[in-house]
Amino acid sequence: MTYVKFEDGFSETHLDCDDEKFPEDFRIKCYDVDRVGFIAQYTYQEAIVGSEEYGYSEHAILVFQLNGLEVDVSPPTFTQSLSRTWLYKFNADEQEHELDFSGSSSFVWDYPKGANQKTIIKKTISMRVDDALAIELYKKTIDGVEVVVRLEGIDAWNDITLTIPQDSKLPANGQQFSTADLNFEVSIEDISPQCSIQYTILTEVSPEIEKKIEKYGEEDNWADEWEHIGSDYIIQTYKIA
């Protein structure tokens, strides 16, 4: 059972009526989400609103009625949504389904750009990563030479949110892995006071160009004047929150 909260999206339905006011027979046909049987009937094609009359309880708008016609609500369009999925498992001894709290998890439902309503289901995991290593790649043309540098942010620990495809398996604690290679998304929520940044020049350059690069390292202004071309985050030791 999944409860979905849309982000960056809306449902837009065109109604043929006067710009100044709705016709006298205008009505909104709703389905009360608190009534029994809602889960079986509710689909993503129904928009959600809160009703002040009923203490902001939620109702699903099904149809607009006006001018003697019924206009179906258009399916919502969205780039991303958050949802909470409740997992139920069948208890053979009790012969009934029971809610599995530990098995329930958060998901991200995503429509890739250009895809035709293809849903990618992802789950999010909060964790603390020890000896965190964040990698950024930058490039810049200096004296006619395209230079690529690798920045490494080394931290005692990071608190992060990891978003991974639902069908992917999180590598075991102690096994080093690249989040970029596994198509995992990383959001760094907090860092330790013990953080240092070092850079490595990946392009063979002259001593003159190397000195010019040193200036960026001293001022730590890579993002301002260099083009960002890639990133990675290396995890080995972690503890799930």
Image: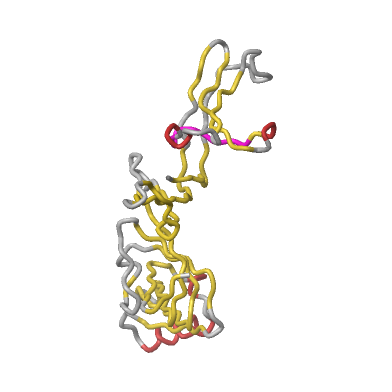
Q: Is residue 231 left or right of residue 223?
A: left
**Image point (53%, 85%), residue name:** 194
Residue name at image x 38 percent, y 47 percent: 97
For the point 36% across and 75% down, which residue is it?
148
In the rendered image, the residue lying farthest to the bottom is 207
Task: Judge left or right: residue 236 versus residue 218.
Answer: left
- Quadrant location of residue 190? bottom right
- The extreme top residue here reads 68
| 12 vs 172: above or below | above
Q: Is residue 62 above or below residue 180?
A: above
Give how far across and how far down residue 143 sits, in percent: 39, 77
Q: Position of residue 43 (x, y in %)?
A: 43, 35
Q: Position of residue 215 (x, y in %)?
A: 50, 84
Q: Is residue 165 magenta?
A: no
Magenta region, residue range: 43-50
Q: Splitting the image into 4 quarters, where does residue 18 fall?
A: top right
Residue 198 vs 144, above or below: the answer is below
Residue 155, compared with residue 84, is above or below; it is below
Q: Hey, which residue is sitting farthest front in the picture?
A: 93
User: Which quadrant holds the N terminus?
Assistant: top left
Decide whether residue 49 is among the magenta residues: yes
Q: Position of residue 111 (x, y in %)?
A: 39, 46
The quadrant in which residue 150 appears is: bottom left
User: What color scheme is it?
Assistant: secondary structure
Residue occupying image coordinates x 45% and y 79%: 153
